[in-house]
Image: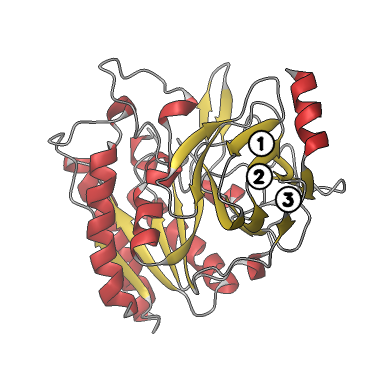
């Protein structure tokens, strides 16, 4: 297996990840070696090349990626456990091609490392592909990650990476429908303002503490994300589902923390509209608590003359479209959510 990798690299033209003609959307860390590391779901790699084949050089066991190549239907590829080459396509018509890779998973335990592209020996990398001018940032938890949305089994256990797909999350589906770039700053299990302790497993830090960091980690990396690299037109925040499940949950505290978090976002993004989302996993008392808290946040800002903070409630999930892992939205439900949010953002943004 390892020798096949060596042969593949020797036969191809290697384009390093540091090449300025490769475009990235999402939080990435550039290593001194030229490699690119990331961990948040939905990070994208865009490139245009001339040739008849393409492969990706990636650290082994980097998870799953959705591939968009020219006008072919999107398809999923897996990073092998013991190889650093992911074969994408060969035997293409010789000419110009466009490639987009979208990271499907969450890589906090083993962040993917992208080394570069391998194309036809006589091929060439073309100019940086043009990306949509519109930009959306989605901040959220497992729902925004697309956690378990491809789980069609009856046994809803902790999901394997193959059933988590950020590409089909409501966030990225909405962005595609609106022809916008999409940055997903999300992690499964995360709260806005409470750390979650799982004995013997991990401590899940809250969003306010992790948001400033490129790799979403306080323990392993201190690089702060430069917000000027991606300035959104609108920020959609879908947090609260995990907060209201904590024993110490207090609606007034949650409200105060959300106000503080939005002030931090406003310092980064002076002109962006902010939309506070609720649902669709919330029902009954929890839904009432969160919607009341989010409504109060909007009222606080409007009293201060800040009128670019908005609210939108997804239709609560009633199971009529099945469920993904552990009661999370199914792929069908994500599609409905994307349709709902797309209509709302079209009107709000004039798109």
User: Is residue 140 left or right of 59 when viewed as pictured?
Assistant: left
Instruction: From the top left corner, tell me how far across and down residue 180 is, in percent.
Output: 44, 66
Residue 160's disc number: none
Residue furthest to the right in view is 32
Instruction: From the top left corner, tell me how far across and down residue 70 is, in percent.
Output: 49, 55
Residue 29's disc number: 3
Secondary structure beneath dot 1 equals loop
Of residue 29 and residue 247, the one placed in the foreground of this image is 29
User: Is residue 301 left or right of 314 when viewed as pictured?
Assistant: right
Is 89 placed above or below 311 here?
A: above
Tell me the quarter of the image containing the C terminus: bottom left
Label 3 vs label 1: CA separation? 10 Å
Earlier along the polypeptide chain: callout 3 or callout 2? Answer: 3
Earlier along the polypeptide chain: callout 1 or callout 2? Answer: 2
**Can residue 59 be seen in the rendering of this structure?**
yes
Residue, x 61% and y 58% (percent of image)? 95
Scheme of image coloration: secondary structure
Q: Mark 1 near mark 2, Cβ–Cβ under 8 Å?
A: yes
User: Is residue 257 left or right of 44 when viewed as pictured?
Assistant: left
Instruction: Give the residue number, with chain letter if any, for mark 2.
Output: 38
Is 315 placed above or below 260 here?
A: above
**Can residue 186 be seen in the rendering of this structure?**
no
Residue, x 41% and y 53% (percent of image)? 172
Residue furthest to the bottom in view is 305
Question: How many residues crowd mark 2 within 10 Å: few (<14), some (14–19), many (20+)?
Answer: many
Label 3 vs label 2: CA separation? 6 Å
Instruction: From the top left corner, tell me how far across and down residue 242 is, in percent.
Output: 38, 39
Residue, x 51% and y 44% (percent of image)? 67
Instruction: Give the residue number, with chain letter if any, for mark 1.
Output: 111
Of residue 154 and residue 45, the one placed in the foreground of this image is 45
Residue, x 59% and y 70% (percent of image)? 268
């Amino acid at each position: 297996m390892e020798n096949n990798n060596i042969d593949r690299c020797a036969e191809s033209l290697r384009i390093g990840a540091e090449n300025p003609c490769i475009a990235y959307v999402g939080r990435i860390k550039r290593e001194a070696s030229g490699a690119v590391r990331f961990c948040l779901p939905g990070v994208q790699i865009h490139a245009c090349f001339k040739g008849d084949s393409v492969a990706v050089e990636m650290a082994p066991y980097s998870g799953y990626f959705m591939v968009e190549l020219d006008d072919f239907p999107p398809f999923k590829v897996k990073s092998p456990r013991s190889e650093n080459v992911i074969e994408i396509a060969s035997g293409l018509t010789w000419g110009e091609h466009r490639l987009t890779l979208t990271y499907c998973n969450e890589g906090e335990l083993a962040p993917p490392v992208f080394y570069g592209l391998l194309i036809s020996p006589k091929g060439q990398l073309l100019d940086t592909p043009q990306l949509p001018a519109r930009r959306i940032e989605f901040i959220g938890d497992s729902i925004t990650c697309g956690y378990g949305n491809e789980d069609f089994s009856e046994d809803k256990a902790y999901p394997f990476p193959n059933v988590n797909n950020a590409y089909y999350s409501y966030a990225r589906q909405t962005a595609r429908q609106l022809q916008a770039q999409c940055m997903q700053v999300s992690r499964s299990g995360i709260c806005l303002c409470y750390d979650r302790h799982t004995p013997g497993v991990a401590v899940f830090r809250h969003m306010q503490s992790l948001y400033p960091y490129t790799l979403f980690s306080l323990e392993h990396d201190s690089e702060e994300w430069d917000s000027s690299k991606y300035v959104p037109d609108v920020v959609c925040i879908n947090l609260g589902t995990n907060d209201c499940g904590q024993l110490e949950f207090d609606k007034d505290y949650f409200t105060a923390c959300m106000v503080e978090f939005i002030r931090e976002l406003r310092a980064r993004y002076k002109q962006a509209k902010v939309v506070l989302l609720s649902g669709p996993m919330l029902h009954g008392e929890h839904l009432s608590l969160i919607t009341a808290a989010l409504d109060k946040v909007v009222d606080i800002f409007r009293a201060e003359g800040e009128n670019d903070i908005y609210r939108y409630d997804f239709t609560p999930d009633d199971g009529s479209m099945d469920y993904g892992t552990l009661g999370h939205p199914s792929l069908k439900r994500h599609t409905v959510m994307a349709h709902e949010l797309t209509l709302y953002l079209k009107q709000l943004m004039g798109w």
